[in-house]
Image (cartoon, grey):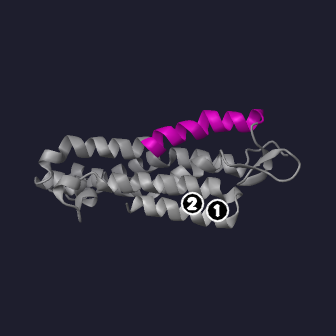
Amino acid sequence: DNGSTPVVYQKLILVGCLPFIIVAVAALIWTAVCLARPQTEFIFSKFMATCFIILFLVHPNIVKTSFSLFSCRDIGDNTLYLTSDYSIECWTGEHSAWAYMLGLPVLIVWGIGIPTMMFMLLMQNRTNFSKPDSRMRFGFFLSGYKSDYYYWEIVILYRKIIIAVASVFLMTIPRMAQGLLCFAILMTAYW
């Protein structure tokens, strides 16, 4: 050990900062567009739509990376090691600190917070979906669904969270059980 931070923790730091980076980059790009073409209509709605879409796309990776910090496996010596890096012993002082001080907050704030925030925004604006500004902002979530089911994309996002949890924690069980549990998750999702 050379005293440097293991890659798995560095990755979690990056993933924890990713939503901030996405919003900052989107703000810079839309500010540049606004400065280049001052007459741009619905600029804030386009900025919000950009953030929503990109956060929606990276959300499963944020959840999976956060959960991977809690996935440990016994490799034969009655000691648990981190599945994503077998050089890290689970629930020792260092691992526990990273798991509880960074992994859990990232999971709660971004893993649960992003879909919850999106759902709340959709609920608040559900009477305005016919307005062009709201259509621009929330069209990604609404297209393909009847107006009564404006929330369905968020249901799908929570389904992705369940699949991400399964993909992290099911790695330690036999393949047959993995397949059966994944099949059960998929069948439940289509019920």
Of the pair 141 and 9, the residue shown nearer to us: 141
Examine the rendering and report whether any part of residue 127 can be seen.
Answer: yes
The stretch of residues the image draws in magenta is: 92-112
Instruction: Give the residue drawn at x 11%, y 54%.
Output: 130
Q: Is residue 38 visible?
A: no
Marks 2/1: CA–CA distance: 6 Å
Look at label 1 and name its amino acid. Ala
Q: Is the magenta stretch mostly helix, strand or loop?
A: helix
Percent x, y of residue 13: 59, 44
What's the residue at 17%, 51% (across, down)? Answer: 134
Q: Name the residue under label 2.
A: 181
Numbered mark located on residue 177 in the image: 1
Where residue 146 sits: x, y (%)? Answer: 18, 60
Q: Residue extending furthest left? A: 131
- Give the amino acid type for the residue marked by disc 2 in the picture: Leu
Q: Position of residue 54 (x, y in %)?
A: 39, 57
- The reply to whether callout 2 and callout 1 are in contact (CB within 8 Å) is yes
